[in-house]
Amino acid sequence: MKILTGNDLSSGDVIWWAGDGWSRQVGDSADVGDRGDDLARAEEAALRVVGAYVIDATITDDGVRPAHIKDRIRALGPTVRPDLTLKPNDADAGNWVI
Amino acid sequence: MYRYDSYDQSIVDARVEEFRDQTQRRLSGALTEDQFKPLRLMNGLYLQLHAYMLRVAIPYGTLSGKQMRKLGEIAAKYDRGYGHFTTRQNLQYNWIKLADAPDILAELATVEMHAIQTSGNCIRNISSDQYAGVSADEIADPRPWAELLRQWSSFHPEFTYLPRKFKICVIASDDDRAAMRLHDIGLKLVSKDGVIGAEVYAGGGMGRTPMVAPLIRDFVPEEEIISYLEACLRVYNRYGRRDNKYKARIKILVHEIGVEEYKRQVEEEYAHMRTLGLNPPVEELDRIRAFFAPPAYETDLSDAIDRADPAFALWVDRQVVAHKAPGYAIVNISLKPLDGIPGDASAEQIARIADLAERYSLDELRVTHVQNLVLPHVKKADLPAIWQALEEIGLAEANLDLITDIIACPGLDYCALANARSIPLAQKIAQRFAEAERQAELGELKVKISGCINACGHHHAGHIGILGVDRRGVENFQLSLGGSGAEDASLGQITGPGFSEDGVVDAIEKVTDLYLAERESGERFLDTYRRIGMKPFKEAIYG
C-alpha cells in the first residue's frame, strides 16, 4: 500500500494521512493509491502539513508497517527514549522498528 | 568572557524580530516552505525526523552560568526536558514547535546567545580548544581570535552564500584538542621571534571525502589574520564548485587544483587584500582581548587533594587535568554515563551544572567537541564538592578519552539524513566495556560513530570509527581503525565488510583483544595500530 506522511506545519509532529484528515498514529494511515502527490500538494497548500511524501507500507498483524526503518522510527519516536515515543509504557517498543 | 556591546545586542534583537515576522508569515501562508526554509535554516531551525530541531550557537564552546541556566530553562519550557551537546560545541533541541521558535530566540538573546549561522552555506560557529585560557601549554588564549572571527564572519556580506558551509577552528597549543586540521580552515597560534601569529591549514574536513588539512602558510602575523582569511575565503568563493554539493567544500577545491596552486592564488589575493586596510583596529582587538584576561585567581592555595575515597580518586585521575594556576584544576564532566545518550543532558542536569560553574568555576564552563563539558577554573579544594554534586545528577562517570567516552551523532533516532542508529550502538559498546578496570587497561581509545557519511560523529577521526550505512533497508556498520583528530591527525581505514549492530561490538572486542596482546610498553591503541598495521587486525576480525 502507499501511505502519505509529513510533519504538522506548526507543531512539527509526525503525521499520517488517515483518509479524511491527519493522524499521529501510523496505524490510522489510509492507502492513498496514486493520489499521494496530489494530496500532498493540496494539504501543504492548506498549511496542514510540511514536507509531505509518499512511502510504501504493508498491513501486518500489528497494523500498518512502513517499509523503511526511517519511517518506522518516525512512526514510533526515538528508540533510545521510550518515554518520548508514542508507546511510553512499552520499554520494548523499539523492537518494532527493527 | 566576551560580553555583547550595544551593537552586538541590537543586531541579535533585530534578528529575533525579523524571524518572528518570517515565522508568522509562514504560519499564515504568506510564505511557502520553499521560501521559508532558507530563512529558518539561517536561524538554526531544521525540520528533522520527529519535529523541528533548533541548533543554538555556543561560540568557541564557552558559556557563563547564566547562559547555561537559560539553556536548561528553554529545554524545560519549550522542549521535552533535555538538550543535546554536539560535536560542533553547539546545543540542539529536538522537539521545537515552529510557533515557539521566535520566543526561544528572544529568550536566548536575553543572555547574549543566538542560533544565527548554525546552518546554511556560511561561516559557522567558530570552534576552539576547551582548555583555552587555562592550559599551561598554550602560547596565547585563542578565544580573542575566535571572537574576532565570530564578529568578522557574522553577516559577512561576501561570505553569506558560499558554495558550501565553512568551519573554522582556532587553537594555540601543540596538543590539538579541537580536531583543528579537520576543519575547512584551522588556525594554530604560534610565536615566532616573540611575535604572535598563526599557522594556517586549509581544506580539511570529514564527510564523504575526508581530508586532513595541509599547511598553507607557516606564519601570518596576528594583525593580518583577517586579511589572510579574507583571501582564503575569496579564492574558495570564486572557484569552489556550486554545481555539485558533494564537491563544493573547500577541501575538494584544494585537492583538485593542488595545495601549491591554492596557496599561490591565496597569496596573490592576500597581496591585494593587504592594500585595502581590512585588518581590525588594534583598539578593537585589545577591547576583545580584555574580556579574556585571566581572572583574579586566589593565591597561596594548596595543591593537595584528599584521595581517601577510591571512587573520588579514580574520578580525579581521569577527569581532572592540570591548570596553569597553582591550586586550580580543570574538571571534565562526562556526558557519557553508562546507558546514557552521548551529549544529552536533562534540564535539571544543565541547571545544576550552571550552579557548579557559578559557585566553583568563576562563572564559566566549556563545551567540548567530544560532547562533554568542562569547568575550567576549579580550586582543588572544591573537587570533592563538585564530585559529590555530579554523583547526585548521574554525571560523575570517570571515562575521559576511554573506550566508553564515545562520540555519537544523533543518528537515525533523530536525524533525517541518517542511515543507521548511532546511539544504541554507542550504548552497546559502553555496556560491553563497562568494567572500569577493563577501560583503564585499554587506556586512551577514542571511539566515534556516525549514522551516515556526513560524519557528524567524526568516525574518520576515531581510533576506532564506525559508520552506519543502509544495506537494503537494514542497518549495517562499517568499522575503521587508525583515525585521529588530534595533533597526529590521520584518517581511519576501513577494515572490510560491515557488520550488524551486535557484530560490530564483537569485532571491536577482537580488535581490543589483539591490541592488548600486541602492544609494547607505553603504547596507546593508536600507536600499536600504526606500528603493526591493519593486517593483523583484519585477521583477528574476519579470521
Image (spheres, coloured by chain):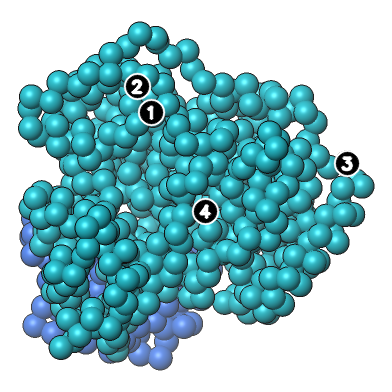
Depth check: give the residue in front, B510 or B394.
Answer: B510
> Reading the chain from its start, which is encountered first: label 4 or label 1?
4
Cα distance between the residues tagged 4 and 3: 28 Å
> Reading the chain from its start, which is encountered first: label 1 or label 3?
3
Q: Chain of mark 3?
A: B
Q: Amino acid at mark 1?
A: His
Residue B293 visible at all:
yes
The shade of chain A is blue
Q: Identify residue for label 3.
A: B277
* Rendered view: B36 above or below B211: above
Q: Are marks 4 and 1 on the same chain?
A: yes
Q: Amino acid at mark 4?
A: Met
Q: Identify residue for label 1.
A: B323
Write the residue at 55% across / 41% down.
Answer: B172
Q: Quadrant of residue B453?
A: bottom left
> Reading the chain from its start, which is encountered first: label 2 or label 4?
4
Cα distance between the residues tagged 1 and 2: 6 Å
Q: Nearer the viewer, mark 4 or mark 1?
A: 1
Q: Amino acid at mark 3?
A: Gly
**SS type, badge 4:** helix
